[in-house]
Image (spheres, helix red, strand yellow):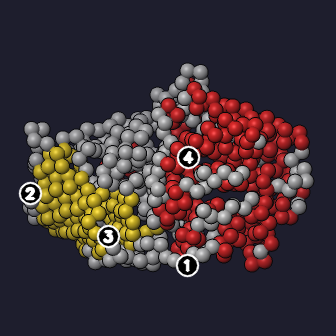
Amino acid sequence: MSSPPQTWDQLVDAAGADEALAAKLEGVLTQARASAALQPIKRVFHYEEVGEHRTWHDGRAHSLEPEIQQTFALAMTDFAAASALSTELPLLAAAHRLTGEAAFAERLLEQLSELVTWSPLQRPGWSCCARGERLPPGGKDGNWLGTGIAIRTVSTLFEILPADGVIDASLKGRLHELLALEIADIVDDWKLQRPWFVQTRNAVTNQWVLPTEGLIHACLLLGRDNFEEAYELGVSNMLQAMSIHGNAGEFEEGHGYASFTVRSMLAAARSMALADDRRAIDHPFLRHFPDWLVQHLQPARHAINCFDAGGAYLPRDGGFRDMLAILVVYLQSPVAQWALENQFDGAGDDFIGLLAAAAGPTIDAKEDPPTYAAYAAATRVNWRSSWDDDATGVWIRGGHPLDQHDHQDRGHVNLIWRGTPILIEAGGCSYDNDERLRLYKSGVGHNVLQIGTTMPPTPPSGAAMEPVPGWQLAFSKGEGTSVPIDVHALNPGSGRVSLDSVPQYERLHSWRRTVTWSDRELVVEDEVALLPGEGDDIILFRWHLATKGEVALEADQQSATARWDKATLKLSADCPIEVTQVQLPDVTLWRPDRTEAGDATHTCLVVQTTQPVSRLSLTTEVHP
């Protein structure tokens, strides 16, 4: 069991008193002054106003039917407003605490006077993100992300601000009345099973966790004894969410959604621990989550970007380190502190980075974490030859029934050789990209099997894509497919794993993929057999290459060789094959420090049998 967490005021005071952090502190105060100069975020009530008063316009609203367009857009402005204020208001409160400057308090009170009128904190409509979706009878789809984030922000402010009446009795009373209403409404959501995630008991999703976090904060702020039943509901919900994940820290949605959701878990767990309730903060999932997160760091400044995790590139001063800083502040995590020191340029220059920089030196972070791991939940094997940026890295995806925000990627193989990406996936593009389901999320965007040559259809703008026979997954919530990975060898110098991916395809009897690798080469052996009596078909594989240029292709009937400046890929089959190359989009290779907008493109090898067959044996050798 770790030591009790510090309160926000203690953390801020410690950072302010650390002379070694004087320059970082001045930078944070400069950011606070920039925030104080901004206009307050105001709630809008009409679709035509979305984008005004510093509100955000979710691009998915453009293609929705008029009768639901405004409802969805306004709900998403509430989420975005809460997210922005969760950064701005604690920064202003800390700056006021450290300097006493009246401008910070004035700006803070101006925004709080607006926020206290936002009832409910999260308006209905967030569930209507695609054409054909409508609110349920009664017009409520339940409390959501904006609920938890906004309540977290209010709770944090009361902890940071000096107890000298910055928030007067009248405003404090109005905030307490608002939170009491939110408590009742969140409890009602679970009692009536109003939101989809309560109806399905889907505790994996952030949509379960964030309202739960808000419930816990609000009950503690207004007095646990006054809301004991509601508080215990919140704790029970939060513990369910933690227990559904792996005890090794695995999270079944990839590192992007994991970071967003676990930040919420940490905030609630910390508030509970300050109230002498350590049931959450000592949970094994939460304690081991930093180890799992750091295992996403691959060479070449890339992260493992399966699921909806977006691009892969992580500069040494990039955003991944924000979550590491949070883990240092909330959990005093040695592995997170090690990663900040050794994989990034220390903690960031923002408010949470300041607090992490103050807390970090007290943490013993000398031991390197392992360079490889295999996880049963969020099923994956990842490996790197060392922690140097120019090391070799491999990761392979399986599948777990609880996977969410996942792609049709069971069996995907990724390779970085001595700091140079070789085999990639398309990554996760923005949700308003019309090709997201067809070219990114589907098997088209990954190094996996396809039965037949039918491509997923291009859906109407904003519409959900129907499942296509022969493809791995339906696109409904929570339909993960179990594909465990058998680990035959995994050590500092090499690895060998295999997996069977039968359940995800129709008409497939077996697909056995075996992957063997070292720092010198990677070999993939694929054995495919269709179901007897179902007829033959074209068997097809894709290899997404980390190059835009056309590769040199040499081929005969049952083999082919592709060469480019970074590697040679050799194919050998037991029946005639043809190999072509196409350009496909990706966000994996996109770098935020480049000026060009939009997605990157890369070369993809399409390997398919020349005739319909019932089985295929294919060996792919990659020699960097």
- Asked if the residues shown at circle 2 and circle 1 are in contact, with their CB atoms under 8 angstroms apart, the answer is no
Nearest the viewer among 72 and 323 is 323
C-alpha distance separating marks 3 and 1: 24 Å
- Return the residue at label 1: 366
Mark found first going from the N terminus, 2 or 1: 1
C-alpha distance separating marks 2 and 1: 53 Å
* Residue at figure coordinates x 86%, y 64% from the top left: 99
Left or right for 254, reference 126: left
- Residue 36 figure quarter: bottom right
Mark found first going from the N terminus, 4 or 2: 4
- Asked if the residues shown at circle 4 and circle 2 are in contact, with their CB atoms under 8 angstroms apart, the answer is no
Location of residue 364 with respect to 135 vertically, above or below: below
C-alpha distance separating marks 4 and 2: 53 Å
- Return the residue at label 4: 239
On residue 575, which mark appears?
Answer: 2
On residue 347, which mark appears?
Answer: none
**Residue 354, how many percent across, how many down?**
70, 68
User: What is the quadrant of the N terminus in the image?
Assistant: bottom right
Label 2 CA crowd tier, 10 Å (few <14, some 14–19, many 20+): some
